[in-house]
Amino acid sequence: MAVLKCSVVTCAYNKSDCCCKGDIMVGGKHAENTDETCCDSFREQGKDNYVSALDHPCQTISIDCEATKCVYNTNYKCHAEKVDIKGGNASDSKQTLCATFREK
């Protein structure tokens, strides 16, 4: 499990730069750089009627990852020690990215 820092303040799962979801999916099947990745688990605050989340944010989290060209991806799992998800005031998952992505 990776130490996750999330700066997407508009995500319903974000609390104190940590994630309350428990696990996330990084998208970007054909990504060759960070801009072609995203957090597919992003849910905008106030947009979903039901958001299942943990009561407390976790610093470590399980990360599934479709970015198969990333050096940290092994069998669709992220094996980086630290992961940085960025997106500030995103209103859509495509406005987020995995800043930890490194092309193989």
Image (cartoon, helix red, strand yellow):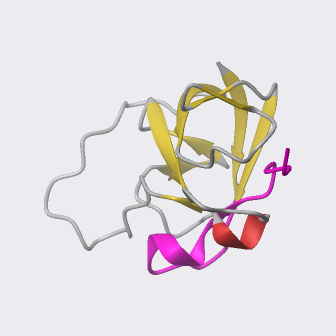
Q: Position of residue 47 (x, y in %)?
A: 25, 73
Q: Position of residue 86 (x, y in %)?
A: 71, 63
The quadrant the N terminus occupies is top right
**As drawn, is 61 to the left or to the right of 97?**
left
Of residues 20 and 66, which is closer to you in this image? 66
Q: Quadrant of residue 74?
A: top right
Of residues 82 and 71, which is closer to you in this image? 71
Q: Quadrant of residue 54?
A: top left
Examine the rendered structure and indicate whether residue 47 appears above or below residue 102.
below
- Please report the bounds of the magenta region as a residue range: 86-104
Q: Position of residue 19 (x, y in %)?
A: 54, 41
Task: Indicate whether residue 78 is drawn in magenta.
Answer: no
**As drawn, is 104 to the left or to the right of 41?**
right
The quadrant the C terminus occupies is top right
- Residue positioned 62% across, 49% down in the render: 67
- Residue positioned 81% across, 25% down in the render: 81
Q: Position of residue 49 (x, y in %)?
A: 13, 63
Q: Quadrant of residue 82?
A: top right
Of residues 100 and 46, which is closer to you in this image? 100
Examine the rendered structure and indicate whether residue 1 appears above or below residue 91.
above
**As drawn, is 31 to the left or to the right of 47?**
right
Q: Residue furthest left?
A: 49
- Residue positioned 78% across, 29% down in the render: 80
Task: Indicate whether residue 94 is drawn in magenta.
Answer: yes
- Residue positioned 61% across, 64% down in the render: 8
